[in-house]
Image (cartoon, coloured by chain):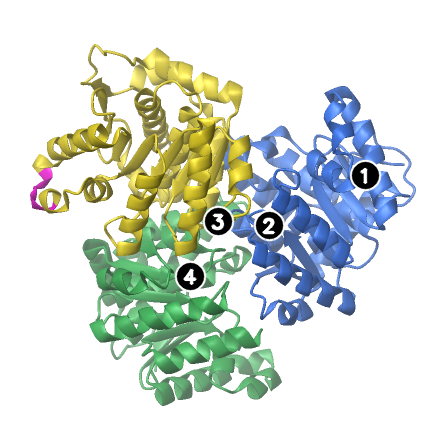
Chain colours: A yellow, B green, C blue
Amino acid sequence: MQEKLKYLNSSQVAGFLARVRREKPLIHHITNYVTANDCANITLHTGGLPVMAHAFDEVEEMVEAARTLVLNIGTLQPDQVAAMIKAGKKANRLGIPVLLDPVGAGATKLRTESARKILSEVKVSVVKGNYAEIAILAGTEAEIRGVDAAGTVEDIDRIAREFAAARDVTVVVTGVTDIVTDGRTGYKISNGHELMGTITGTGCMAGSVIGCFLALQDSPVHEAAAALICYGIAGEIAAGRADVYGPASFRTAFFDSLYNLQEKQISRMAKFAAY
Amino acid sequence: MQEKLKYLNSSQVAGFLARVRREKPLIHHITNYVTANDCANITLHTGGLPVMAHAFDEVEEMVEAARTLVLNIGTLQPDQVAAMIKAGKKANRLGIPVLLDPVGAGATKLRTESARKILSEVKVSVVKGNYAEIAILAGTEAEIRGVDAAGTVEDIDRIAREFAAARDVTVVVTGVTDIVTDGRTGYKISNGHELMGTITGTGCMAGSVIGCFLALQDSPVHEAAAALICYGIAGEIAAGRADVYGPASFRTAFFDSLYNLQEKQISRMAKFAAY
Amino acid sequence: MQEKLKYLNSSQVAGFLARVRREKPLIHHITNYVTANDCANITLHTGGLPVMAHAFDEVEEMVEAARTLVLNIGTLQPDQVAAMIKAGKKANRLGIPVLLDPVGAGATKLRTESARKILSEVKVSVVKGNYAEIAILAGTEAEIRGVDAAGTVEDIDRIAREFAAARDVTVVVTGVTDIVTDGRTGYKISNGHELMGTITGTGCMAGSVIGCFLALQDSPVHEAAAALICYGIAGEIAAGRADVYGPASFRTAFFDSLYNLQEKQISRMAKFAAY
C-alpha cells in the first residue's frame, strides 16, 4: 500500500530516528506503575532518556529539563490529574510538546473525565489511544459501537480527523492499521505484528516512542507517524526471528530490534500511506 | 502420584484452559506495583485480559466489566484496603468471583489485619498464600511454627481444610506441593520447578492465572487446581529448555511455555492427587 | 589496573558473595515503582530475599525482620520521606545498615532536599549515586559542572572522599569507573560494560546488590566495592555472550550471569585498585 507521499517518506522516517539517537532527548513521563519499566526501557532503546516523576511538588521543575511530556492515565489516582495538568501547563508555557495517552477512557467515568479535563486545560500535541478511547473522547461512542469490524477503519478515520480538526491536536489511533491525523494531513500505517498484542504495554510504549520523536519539534503528525512506522517494523523483525517461541521471547527480540533498527530496514519494510 | 480422581482429570484441566483462551475474560486486579507488569503479562499469556485499576472512585465501575477480581496486598497502603473492600462488595453483588492474595500476612500487623478485614467483609472465592500466610489467617501461627519440614505438608493440609470449611472459601497453599481445598474436596499438586523460586512474582502470578480460571464460574476448587497444574507444568517445560541458563532466561521460557501449553503436555505431565 | 591491595582481594569478593548466597538476607526496600521488579529480581539473583514495603504504618515492623534497608527516591512522593526516615531510624536503633540511593538529587528541589533530610536524620552506611547526584549532596555543584570529562574521575574522587570523611558515610559513585570510599580507604573499580547503560534500572539494582553485601556487616567500604565488582563482572560476562543482540537479551544474560557467577570468574576478571 506504499504510495507517493505528500510529506513523509521512509528516508525521513530514518532521519527522525537518527536525530533522536543523536540528541538523546529527556522524556518526562507521568505514567502508570504497570508499564513504567517498559516505557523507560523503550525510551532508552529508541534513543531518548526517560525520567518518571509524578509528585505535584516537582513536576514543573522536571518538565523544565525535558523535551517532551508524556501523560498516561493507566493507573490513575484522582490527585495525579492535578499534577498532570500542572506539568502540562508548564510544558505549554515552555513550548514543550505534550502527549496524552487516555488509557481506559470510556471504561470508567474517572478516566473519561480526567482525560477530557487534561485535554481542555492543557494544549496537547498528540492524543494517542485505541479505537474505543479515541471514539469516547471524540464524543461519538454511540456511533463507534454500532459499526461492524469491516467498517471500523473508515469510521474511526473520519472520527479521528474530525476530532483532530475540532481540537487542533494530532490524533493517533492504534490498531491493526494505525491512523495518524492532524485533521488535514494523515497517515495509515500497516506495520506491526499480532505478537505485539500478546504482551502488556505495547500501547503505553508506543506513547513513549512517539514522545521521543515529538522532542524533535518538527511536525507532530509526521513525527508520530514516523515513530509508529519504526515501532511496527521492529515488531515485524522481532516476530521473524528464529529464537522467538512466544510472547516473552518476542518481547526481548522486539526491544533489541528497535534498538538495532537500521535505515535500510525502514526503507524496505515501511508500509504506510498518506492522504 | 496420579490417582483415579473424583472430579478433575487432565482433560478437564485442558478443557478449562481452552475455555479461558476462547472467552478471554477480563481480570480486574487491585495489586502491588512490584509485580503488576508480570501479572498483566501472565494474564494475557493464560488467555485473559488484564486491567489494573485501584482508585476508590473507579473500582466499582471497573469490576462491572470484569469476570474476576484479584486482590493482592503486596505493597499495601492503608487507603487501598477501602478500595479493595468496595470493589469486593460490588463483585459479590454481581456474582463475580474474588481471589485474595494476602502477601506478607504475618509479617506486619497492617497486612495481617487488612487481609482479615477483607476476608470478613468480602465473600472471597479463593484465598491463596504460602504456608506462613495461610497459617496466620487460619489463626494457627503457634502451631505452624512448631512443626518441622517433614511434618509441614500434612499439618498445613489440615489447617487449610479446617480454614476452608470454617470460612466457606477455597484455600490454596503454594509450596513444593501445592494444596487446594474447599474443606471437602481437595488436591495436592506436585507440578512446578525450583527455578520458579528464583524469580520474583511467581506467587502473585499464580493468583492471576487462578483468576483467569475462576472467571469460568465452574467450581473454584477445581478451577484453582487446574490453574496451578497448568502453571506448574509450564514451569517444568521451561526448566527443561536448552536455552535456559538461569532465572531470567527461565522467566522468558516460562511465559512462552504457558502461552504455548498444549493439551497433550497437560495429559502427559500433570501430577496431582485428589482426596 | 589490578594492584597489590590493602584490604580487599578477589577471593574475599567471592567469599562475600558466597556468604550472601548462604545466609539469604532479607533486604527491605522502600523504592520506586519503575524498577522495583528489577530490584526484587536482582536481590534474588544475588542471593538475598527482597521485600518491598512502604506504608508508614508497617515500615518499622518490616525493618525488624530485615538485615539491610535500601532507600531509593526514584519516584518520590513527599509522604514517602517520612516513612523512609521512620524506617531508617528504626534500622539505626537495631544496628541494621541503611543504603540511600538519592535518584535525581539535583534535578528537583524535592529530591535534593529529601535526600539531604534523610542523610541528616538517619545514620546512612552507604550513599550511592552517579556523579551529579553525589556532587550535589556534597555541596559542590558549581565545581563539578565546570570540569571537563577528562578531569571528572579525579575531581569526583576528591569530592567523594571529602564527603565521606565529613559525613562518616561510605560513598559510592557509579560511572565508567566506580568509586567507593569511606574517606580513608577507597577503591576504583573498572568492571562493567557499556550495555549496562542501555537498560533502565542498573543504578537502582546496583543499590540492591550492595544492600545484599551490607547485610554481612563486615565493612561497608569493602562490601560495597565487592558488590560492584561482582555486578560489573556479571555485565561483562553477559555482554560477551553469543546470544546477546541488544539491550533486552543483554538484560536476560546479565541477570543469569550474576546468578551463576563463580569464584574463578571473579578472580580472573576483577579489575579494581585500592588507594
Rounded to the nearest angstrom, the CA distance separating label 2 from label 3 is 14 Å
Q: SS at mark 2?
A: helix
- Out of C174 and B121, give the one closest to the viewer: B121
Same chain assignment for discs 2 and 1: yes
Asked if residue A195 lies left or right of residue C84, the reply is left
Residue A239's mark?
A: none
Query: Which quadrant: the C terminus of chain C?
Result: top right
Q: SS at mark 3?
A: helix
Image location (x, y in percent) of residue A63? 51, 35
Q: Is residue C80 above or below residue A179?
A: below
Of tags 1 and 3, which is closer to the observer?
A: 1
Label 4: few (<14), some (14–19) or many (≥20) C-alpha neighbours in 10 Å: many
Q: Amino acid at mark 4?
A: Thr
Which chain is home to disc 3?
B
Q: Which circle's residue, 2 or 1, is located before the other in the chain?
A: 2
Quadrant in the rendering for residue A96: top left
Q: Amino acid at mark 1?
A: Ala
Of tags 4 and 3, which is closer to the observer?
A: 4
Same chain assignment for discs 1 and 3: no
Quadrant in the rendering for residue C201: top right
Asked if residue C69 lies left or right of residue B75, the reply is right
Image location (x, y in percent) of residue B52? 36, 56
Give the residue at mark 1.
Answer: C160
| Secondary structure predominantly adopted by residues drawn in magenta | helix
For the point 30% across and 51% down, the residue is A111
Q: Is residue B223 above or below residue A163?
A: below
Residue B31's mark?
A: 4
Q: SS at mark 4?
A: loop
Which chain is home to disc 2?
C
Q: Are marks 2 and 1 in contact (CB under 8 Å)?
A: no
